[in-house]
């Protein structure tokens, strides 16, 4: 049995020209075919060529590298508690290993509360943010919420000189951190209430 390789249709279109070797200079064999069969074979050849081109494109395509997020550099201008809270909400939490969360603070808190099944209305949650001025370059950002009959409080420090947000207690480190490739950002365009509210003087001392 001889293995034959298709070369092309004949000039008249009623034959398939074949050769005994894929690199032969000329066809040494032919097969009579009908017009319908020739059309079907041509479609198959075109499809095979298209699939080969797609496979070649996939092999040559390099995987896209994830963009490297650059943390903001300081200093940042903060003139009021409201501006301090706004700045903190938009910053990524940095842990002890100098690694940053995947989403900013406000989104991370909402994502973790949702994961922990803390069902609180958005307006009530936004009332839980507090700001205390610690010095010329630092602000304490606090968040209180009620869960299982207890009030929980997370505290962070915003350093405006370095534009860094660091946790002050374990809850802050946990609730402000998200490590995930994709997180639905639920931060509203405009938050209501709780924006930059300061503690009373008796509570303004950093613990």
Image (tube, rainbow, N blue to C red):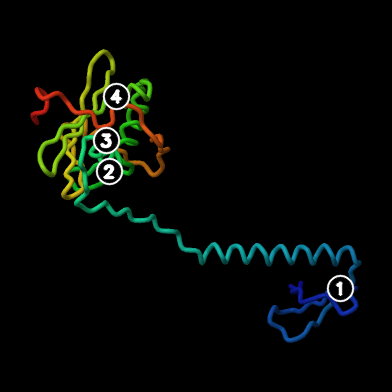
- In the displayed structure, does residue 76 sit left or right of residue 117? left
- Which residue is disc 1 drawn over? 31
**Element marked by disc 4:** loop
- Which residue is disc 2 drawn over? 91
Dot 3 or dot 4: first in sequence order is 4
Residue drawn at 76 percent across, 79 percent down:
19
Residue 40, picture quadrant: bottom right
Label 4 with label 1: CB-CB less than 8 Å = no
| On screen, residue 50 above or below 76 | below
Label 3: few (<14), some or many (≥20) within 10 Å? many
Dot 2 or dot 4: first in sequence order is 2
Dot 1 or dot 3: first in sequence order is 1
Label 1: few (<14), some or many (≥20) within 10 Å? few
**Element marked by disc 2:** loop
**Element marked by disc 1:** strand
- Which residue is disc 3 drawn over? 176
Residue drawn at 40 percent across, 58 percent down:
65
**Circle 4 or circle 1, nearest the eye:** 4
**Circle 2 or circle 4, nearest the eye:** 4
Measure how far apart labels 1 and 3 are at the Cα level: 74 Å
Q: Position of residue 75 (x, y in %)?
A: 19, 51
Measure how far apart labels 2 and 3 are at the Cα level: 10 Å
């Amino acid at each position: 049995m001889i293995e034959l390789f298709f070369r092309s249709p004949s000039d008249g279109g009623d034959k398939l020209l074949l050769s005994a070797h894929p690199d032969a200079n000329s066809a040494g064999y032919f097969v009579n075919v009908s017009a319908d069969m020739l059309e079907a074979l041509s479609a198959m050849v075109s499809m095979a060529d298209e699939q080969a081109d797609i496979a070649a494109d996939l092999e040559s395509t390099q995987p896209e590298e994830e963009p490297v997020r650059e943390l903001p550099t300081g200093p940042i201008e903060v003139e009021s508690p409201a501006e301090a809270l706004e700045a903190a909400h938009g910053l990524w939490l940095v842990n002890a290993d100098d690694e940053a969360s995947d989403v900013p603070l406000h989104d991370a808190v909402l994502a973790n509360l949702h994961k922990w099944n803390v069902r609180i209305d958005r307006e009530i949650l936004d009332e839980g943010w507090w700001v205390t001025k610690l010095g010329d370059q630092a602000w304490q950002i606090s968040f209180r919420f009620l869960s299982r009959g207890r009030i929980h409080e997370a505290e962070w420090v915003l350093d405006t000189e370095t534009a860094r947000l660091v946790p002050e207690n374990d809850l802050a480190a946990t609730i402000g951190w998200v490590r995930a490739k994709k997180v639905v950002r639920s931060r509203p365009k405009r938050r209501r209430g709780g924006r930059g509210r300061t503690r009373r003087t008796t509570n303004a001392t950093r613990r």
